[in-house]
Image (tube, grey):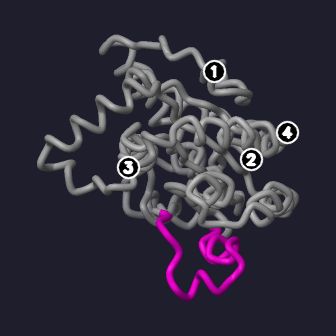
Amino acid sequence: MPHPLPPASRLSDVDLRGALDKSAYKKRHGLVRTRLREIQLAYKFADKRAVVLIEGWDAVGKGGVIRRLTSPLDPRGYHVWPIGAPTEEERGEHYLQRFWRRLPPAGVMAVFDRSWYGRVLVERVEGFAKAADWKRGYGEINAFEKMLTDDGVRIVKLFLHISAETQSARLLDRMTDPLEAWKMTPSDLRNVELRPEYEAAIDEMFERCSPRNAPWHAVPFAQKAFGRIAALETVASCLSEGLDMALPPLDEKVAAAARKAGLLPAAKAKALARGRKRGS
């Protein structure tokens, strides 16, 4: 499995020239799909938890990454949380409370389409949070994530990046596609006007919220094929690092029943039940 993208520093440092041809994409996509399935099973049997955050520019392709991330997985072992504006009830709570309620149980992965970083991004830029509140947010978020990682939760944070010109072109494509136009809101176009403010907020987010145990990774997304593979491979590499990937052997009772039913020779059933011990 290729190495993950390096931790992000500044948007201006991201090389957007990455590209893959169809053959390379197909090969790497097949490999990473298998790896993601293996990772999900390893987390299930080790009772481990994972959180994947997907942030990025409007129209960059977050939904496509999430679909490809989850398509090889057993739906019982993950949950996708699309994050929009807080409800009236949630506005009366601490902003992190709604995310606490969505954290995964043992053996499960949670994927957040947008996340608690809204406090230092959209709430900062749009003025939905007071300056004192969003400035305090960096420390609160770091403390929140440290509690999770100290408790064994693996966190992967991706920011999908494109140029301003590419974003404008994709927004125009979305507006003219009947299957995509429903996603558009006036705020999408307002965000284009506020892009310099968002760039400054994103760079500060990278600088202040990329500890060693949960760094940000900026994914080049000028070519969607390249961006999707880079995103999936980064998730797979980060989630599998230091993880025992050995799967449990066939249950001995199942092996005995298969032998009794004549489906497996005795030696084969015994070998499958013995398998390879985890950690070996």
- The residue wearing badge 3 is 188
Q: Are marks 3 and 1 in contact (CB under 8 Å)?
A: no
Coordinates of residue 165 in the picture (x, y in percent): 38, 24
Give the quadrant of the C terminus: top right
Q: Counting other residues with Cα less than 10 Å from the Cα at mark 1, is it few (<14), some (14-19), or many (20 or more)?
A: few
Q: Tell me the SS state at disc 1.
A: helix
Front-lying residue, 54 or 268: 54
**Mark closer to the chain start, 1 or 4:** 1
N-terminal of the pair, mark 4 or mark 3, is: 3
Q: Whole-Å distance between the Cαs marked 1 and 2?
A: 43 Å
Is 182 or 237 nearer to us in this picture? 182
Q: Position of residue 229 (x, y in %)?
A: 46, 27
Tell me which secondary structure the magenta stretch mostly adopts: loop
Instruction: Point out the image quarter for the N terminus.
Output: top right
Q: Kindly identify which residue carries mark 2.
A: 278
Q: Earlier in the sequence, mark 3 or mark 1?
A: 1
Image coordinates for residue 152, horizontal then vertical, percent: 81, 58
Q: CA distance from mark 2 to mark 4?
A: 27 Å
Q: Disc 1 marks which residue?
A: 12
Please report the bounds of the magenta region as a residue range: 83-104
Q: What amino acid is at disc 4?
A: Arg
Which residue matches tag 4?
Answer: 212
Would you place residue 79 above or below residue 264 in this image? below
The image quarter in which residue 225 lies: top left
Q: Nearer the viewer, mark 4 or mark 3?
A: 3
